[in-house]
Each structure stands twice: as structure tokens, then as C-alpha cells.
Image: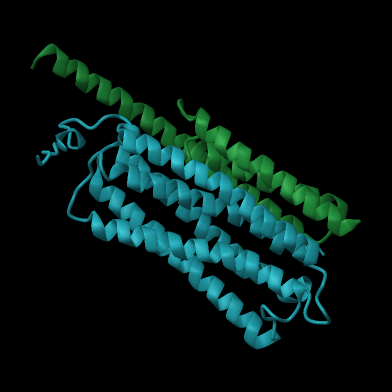
Amino acid sequence: MTDTKVNNMSKESFRRQKSREEMQKQLISFGLMIVLTLVAFAVVAMDTFHKGFVIPFLFLMAIVQAGFQFYYFMHLKERGTGMAALLIYGGVWAAFLTLAGLIVISWW
Amino acid sequence: MAQVHDHSELFPEVMPPEPEKATLEGKNKFFGIWFFLGGETVLFASLFGVYLALKNSTAGGPSSQELFGLGLVFIMTMLLLTSSLTSVYAMYHMRNNDFKKMYLWLGITGLLGIGFLACEIYEFAHYITDYGFTFRSSAFGSAFYALVGFHGGHVLFGICWLTTLLIRNAKRGLNLYNAPKFNTFSIYWHFIDVVWVFIFSVVYLMGKVG
């Protein structure tokens, strides 16, 4: 076997190792997302907390879960995804303005 | 003079580590899907905004507290969240150049999506037949079906997209031509789950709270 071939193989096994580690992180984030979902449902099902607490809490749970999806499941934490992040955060910013506008005019 | 097209660069002996972004086409698809999803975010935000503004305008019809049941919504959430994980598995096998396992996990992803859609159809049918709650019942009804139905439409579109991909590429094996296609679908599918997270939180859970 030539040196370059051996080199390529060790590179490949290193990449696979990295990939497996990444998969473990994704599994952990899946577990955390399940937990966040259970907590959100439980808070509503228990019906003991005040509305003023529950609603911001549910928002927070949803935003954290969306972050897990973006960074771990959609690979936004990998290198070379700056442009993708810019596009989606541009969308999120416009979405925030849209929501804020609609909510403010309907509450006034 | 006719040009001879050489596509051999799409079928390398050793696959690169990120086959979905190894070609210009792949890079463009990655850019394109995120651009599209940025727009989709604004579109769904508009529907969420409309829903929040109109959710209490029930016109004497059933309210969100009377209608929604948490059990079915929980099942739907688990189905879609799990399908998000199975498509992560599919992309893991794509990067390891394992075509069969990628197909297996994409197939499971599709089945979970169909399960989700079946629950949603059951849910809507239940509201319409048992409560007489339709798109035309009230402003709340219109806003609810527009938002949740539009998401369901996205799931349906995703299932059609996936089915087409799986049939069209069944005999091709994995190469640099179709790897970006599977990856683009996978990113879209995760986004559909992100939207669902906000639907179950804002529409169903907050609807139960009042």
C-alpha cells in the first residue's frame, strides 16, 4: 500500500470518528428537545401556574428548541454557513417586525 | 458543433467529506434553501400575527379552550420531532456514503410525516363534524385553519418532494449530483419541525391557557 493511500484511510477514519461524535451530540440535543417539549406540555397540563408566567415560559421553550434545530439538526454550527445564518436571521428579524406590528395594532 | 458533456467529476472514486456541498450546484442549493426559508419565516410570522390578533374573535362559536385536546397534539409533536431526528440519521449516512441506510432513514422520515398528516386530518375532521368549527365559523376559525393548515400543506409538500426524490434516484446510488438534493430536502424538513414547535406552543398550549 502506498503512503498516500494509508494517509487517505487514516483521514477517512478520523472523519468518521468526528462524524460519530457529532451524531452523539445530535442525539443529546434530540433528548433535550423531548425534555423541553414534555416540560412545556406539563406546565400547561398541571394548570397551577399563572398565565403571566406560562406564556413567556412557553415562548422561551420554543426558542431554545428552534436553536437546537438550527445549530445541531440543520448543521448551522459547521464552518462556511455564515451566509445561511445571515439569510435565516434576516428572515427572523423581518418576522419579528411583522409579529410586533400585527400584535401592537390589534392591542391598541 | 455539439458539445460533449463530461460528468465524470460527479462520480468520484472517493467521495468528499461533504458531498452535498462539493459542487457549485450543491453550494447554490444550500444557499437557495436558506434564502427560501428566510422568506418562509416571514410568511409564517404573518400567519401567526393574524392568529394572535383574531384568536379571541370566536363569534359565539367554540373557543380554543373548548376545542383543543393536548393528547393528540402531543402525539403529533412526537411524530414530527422524531422524523426530524431520522432525517439527521439519513444525512449522517449520506456523509458516510451509505446509500441504502440513507434510503432506509429517509423512508422512515416519510412514514412519520404521513402519520403526522393523518393525525392532523383526523383533528380537523373532528372539529368540523363534532363542533361545527370550520374555516367560515369565525375569525378565529379562519386564522386557525389558515395557520395550521398552511403548515400541514408544507408537510404534504415535503412528503411529495421526498417520494419523488426516492423514486427518481432509487437506481442511481449516491453521487455528487443527487447528494445536494437529499440535503436540501432534509433542511426543509427540519424547518417544518421548527414551525411546528411554535404552532404547538403558541396555538395549542397557549390556547389551553387562554
Q: What is the quadrant of the N terminus of chain B in the image?
A: top left
Residue furthest out toward the front:
B1
With respect to residue B18, does A53 lie above or below?
A: below
In the image, residue B60 lies at what x, y percent?
A: 83, 82
Left or right: A5 with respect to B147?
left
Q: What is the quadrant of the C terminus of chain B in the image?
A: bottom right
Q: Nearer the viewer, residue B40 or B185?
A: B40
Residue B172 showing in the rendered view = yes
Quadrant position of residue B125 = bottom right
Q: Nearer the viewer, residue B83 or B24?
A: B24
Letter of the cyan chain: B
Left or right: A57 with respect to B196?
right
Which residue corresponds to the image point at 10% horizontal and 41% vertical from the top-left? B2
In the image, residue B84 lies at what x, y percent?
A: 47, 51
Which residue corresponds to the image point at 57% horizontal and 44% vertical from the top-left? B38
Residue furthest out toward the top:
A3
Q: Nearer the viewer, residue A58 or B23?
A: B23
Quadrant position of residue B97 = top left
In the image, residue B113 lies at what x, y percent?
A: 45, 62
In the image, residue A54 lies at what x, y percent?
A: 80, 53
Looking at the image, what colour scheme do you see?
by chain
Which residue corresponds to the image point at 15% horizontal and 32% vertical from the top-left? B13
With respect to residue B6, does B134 lie above or below?
A: below
Q: Nearer the viewer, residue B45 or B202?
A: B45
Chain A on-screen colour? green
Which residue corresponds to the image point at 68% horizontal and 40% vertical from the top-left? A93
